[in-house]
Amino acid sequence: MNEKMLQEALLISPFHRWLGLGIQSRTESELELTMPWREEIISNPSIGAAHGGILASLVDLTGLYVLIATGTSAKATADLRVDYHRPAIGGPLTAVGRAVKVGRQISVAESRILGSEGELLASGRGAYICG
């Protein structure tokens, strides 16, 4: 899938558009997405930290779309594991994903979410239904 088609697919969902996701870079094995900071994602106003669900969504979406970028027909998330390493305070956020295993029925990808200084905020692995 070329980059223009991938960006169009990425923006099909209203949620993805709301997040403001964009393709930063793409190689054969990795996909890097960016998300601008939005005040609406803050769940802890005392420190200005983003809700963990936003980071989990980025882990999930990046894993799904890195598989789609490799030509896999990933359709839905079967399993998702997210580890939180530090609060996301400010942005933009960067999500870097790579395919781990491409299969006919299940494919697996790993993702890392980085803050504006390149610090690791969250990481995770997703299994996706293909077919």
Image (tube, rainbow, N blue to C red):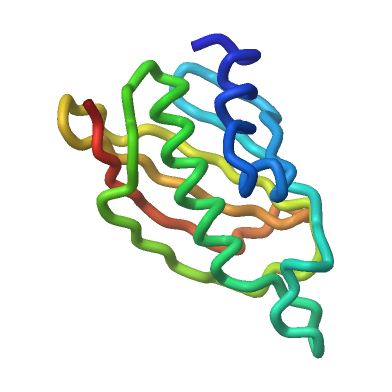
Identify the residue shown where x is 16% and y is 32%. 105
Identify the residue shown where x is 58% and y is 39%. 13
Direction left: furthest residue: 105
**Image position of 24 with respect to 15: above or below:** above
Residue 99: image location, x then y, percent: 37, 32
Direction top: furthest residue: 2
Is residue 16 rendered to the left or right of residue 64?
A: right
Res 24 quadrant in image: top right
**Image position of 81 with respect to 84: above or below:** above
Q: Nearer the viewer, residue 1 or 11?
A: 11
Res 109 quadrant in image: top left
Direction bottom: furthest residue: 46
Residue 54: image location, x then y, percent: 60, 62
**Image position of 3 with respect to 75: above or below:** above
Q: Nearer the viewer, residue 71 or 18?
A: 18
Is residue 17 rendered to the left or right of residue 90?
A: left
Identify the residue shown where x is 66% and y is 74%. 87
Res 67 quadrant in image: top left
How many marks do you count on the picture?
0
Is residue 70 rendered to the left or right of residue 91?
A: left
Residue 120: image location, x then y, percent: 60, 59
Residue 32: image location, x then y, percent: 61, 34
Is residue 129 rendered to the left or right of residue 91?
A: left
Identify the residue shown where x is 72% and y is 84%. 44
Quadrant in which the C terminus is drawn: top left
